[in-house]
Amino acid sequence: MSIPPILDVRRADDRLHTTIDWLDSRHSFSFGHHYDPDNTHFGVLMVNNDDIVRPGAGFDTHPHRDMEIVTWVLRGSLVHQDSTGNSGVIYPGLAQRMSAGTGILHSEKNDSWRYTATAERHDEPVRFVQMWVLPDEAGIEPGYEQLEIDDELLTGGLVPVASGMDRYADHSAIRIRNRHAAMHVARMRPDRPVMLPDAPFVHVFVAQGEAALEGVGHLAEGDAVRATGDGGRQLTTATGAEIVVWEMHAALGRS
């Protein structure tokens, strides 16, 4: 696939924004009542929502269909329950994938209420990134998978977190039903630059901290870069950063 190289920088404050009493959500792409016909997706990535949910609140039971949904928690913890009987608590360093397939109902709630060893009750908002990609085919059986990968992230390098690509079959934490896409995470250190994947479509999201991308410069928390036909650039940080990277070898409407 021959694509002219493009680096499209999207700043954090320019994202679409939904705020209600229990939710602060920033959307990288059109979502809900926010619609921009020129910003519906990138590659096969349809949703990149940066959500903060207050304690004791969350998304009540709601449906999804024919979508691969990956959730990555940055702070706090999130309780998942769905209509196929799966349930679990998602926290930083634990990867989760839900395949909506023919149809699934699920809820996501802030699980921050807890007791410490001193019997004091604490609570905190949960912050997570939720990402949606289309599956290779519609009508698959719904599914759920989660796996702890906190130890792998200690290296500071780029770690495959969710993938449908054969090249990551041996070390991807969880599988998604899209053979053209893989999601990576790096908890970057100042002493270890990260090389971005060489792919026709690469989406870089600075989830926490600050970084610098070769040819772009400074990226603040919440900033994103959509790289088209321009993989293999170096990403660095002076203070530490957590980045989420989607490597995609196809795009909607392209063959």
Image: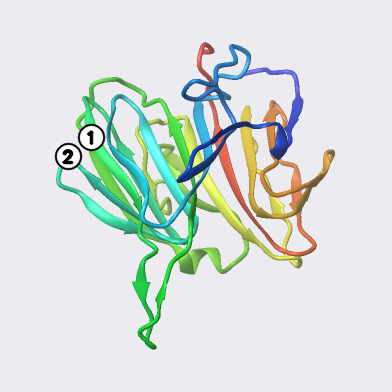
* First of labels 1, 2 by sequence position: 2
Q: Nearer the viewer, residue 179 or 104?
A: 104
Mark 1 residue type: Leu
Element assignment for label 2: loop
Label 2 crowd (10 A; few <14 / some 14-19 / many >=20): some
List the residue tagged with mark 2.
Answer: 83
Disc 1, disc 2: CB below 8 Å? yes
Colour mode of the rendering: rainbow
Residue 217, position as x, y percentages in the image:
84, 44
Residue 4 visible from this viewpoint: yes
Q: Nearer the viewer, residue 9 or 215?
A: 9
**From the image, which quarter does the N terminus lie in?**
top right
Question: Which element is circle 1 on?
Answer: strand
User: Looking at the image, which residue sits at the far bottom?
Assistant: 118
Of residues 128 and 181, the one nearer the viewer is 128
x and y, in percent, of residue 87 in the image = 23, 52
Q: Residues within 10 Å of mark 1 (few under 14, many from 20)?
A: some
| Numbered badge on residue 5 | none
Q: Residue at x 75, y 67 (%)?
A: 191
**Which residue is denoted by mark 1 in the rendering?**
105
Q: Position of residue 231 (x, y in %)?
A: 69, 35
Residue 17 to residue 34: above or below:
below
Answer whether residue 199 is visible to the viewer in this image: no
Q: What's the residue at 54%, 48% (across, down)?
A: 184
Q: Residue drawn at (23%, 35%), measured in percent from left and top?
A: 105
Q: Is residue 243 left or right of residue 168?
A: right
Q: Residue 232 placed where, x, y %? A: 71, 41
Marks 1 and 2 sit apart, C-alpha to C-alpha, by 5 Å
Dot 2 amino acid type:
Ser
Q: Nearer the viewer, residue 248 or 108?
A: 108
